């Protein structure tokens, strides 16, 4: 029971911080307003780790490499701790790195999935007007929804592009990411 509690606690804490780091990366990628409250939240939570790392790891081609390295290292540590707790053996590093990448891909798909879902629900209930959270959600989801809208125009005023993108994200998750997670988990445990 203690192992399950420890695994739960490690998973929750690491997943929360990984989500905040990934959101910060996505917010920089979409060019979100730095002074948006959500952007400020992610900056304040991640700056203690990222500021010192940025002195060692510079940006490349406009991409914040320090965030990507931090994401990968934290995911490797999380998975290493979880595998060690479950199996009482040290995991193999190649499997851990692949598992970390697979978990980060799954987390990215989840963020897109839930932001699209929230955007759809808010479009039904939110009156027109400015909302800092809605602005972020629209900016995160638009790079995925805009190409889908080009191929699937609204039918009778109903935009089906969110449905198509959600199905595509779940397809990628089911047939690619889950397979990669299972394979890399086996590689991390068995070597």
Image: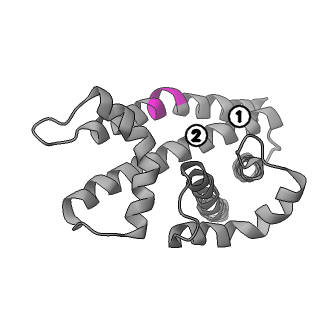
Q: What's the distance in space between the residues labelled 1 and 2, CA to CA? A: 11 Å
User: Circle 2 is placed at which residue position?
Assistant: 105
Q: Residue at horizontal 52%, vertical 68%? A: 38
Residue 79 place in picture, x, y as percent = 70, 48
Label 1, on which residue? 98
**Residue 90: within the magenta?**
no
Query: Taking the image as drawn, is residue 169 in sight?
Result: yes
Q: Residues within 10 Å of mark 2 (few under 14, many from 20)?
A: some
Front residue (pair 2, 51) = 51
| Quadrant of the image containing the N terminus | bottom right
Please state if 84 lies on the left or on the right of 144 as rendered: right
Q: Give how far across and how far down residue 31 sits, in percent.
A: 56, 53
Secondary structure category for the residue under label 2: helix
Name the residue rendered at 72%, 30% in the picture: 187
Locate residue 14, reporting x and y percent.
Answer: 66, 60
Residue 183 disc label: none
Q: Nearer the viewer, mark 1 or mark 2?
A: 2
Bounds of the magenta segment? 172-176
């Amino acid at each position: 029971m203690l192992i399950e509690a420890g695994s739960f606690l490690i998973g929750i804490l690491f997943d929360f911080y990984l989500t905040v780091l990934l959101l910060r990366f996505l917010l920089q990628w979409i060019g979100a307003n730095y002074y948006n409250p959500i952007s400020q939240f992610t900056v304040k939570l991640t700056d203690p780790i990222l500021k010192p790392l940025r002195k060692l790891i510079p940006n490349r081609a406009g991409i914040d490499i320090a965030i990507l390295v931090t994401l990968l290292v934290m995911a490797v540590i999380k998975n290493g701790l979880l595998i060690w707790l479950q199996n009482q053996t040290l995991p193999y590093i190649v499997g851990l790195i692949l598992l970390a990448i697979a978990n980060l891909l799954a987390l990215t798909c989840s963020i897109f999935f839930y932001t699209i879902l929230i955007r759809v629900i808010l479009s039904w209930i939110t009156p027109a007007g400015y909302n800092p959270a809605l602005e972020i959600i629209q900016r995160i989801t638009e790079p995925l929804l805009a190409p889908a809208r080009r191929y699937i125009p609204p039918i009778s005023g109903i935009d089906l592009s969110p449905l198509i993108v959600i199905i595509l994200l779940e397809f990628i998750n089911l047939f690619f990411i889950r397979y990669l997670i299972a394979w890399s988990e086996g590689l991390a445990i068995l070597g």
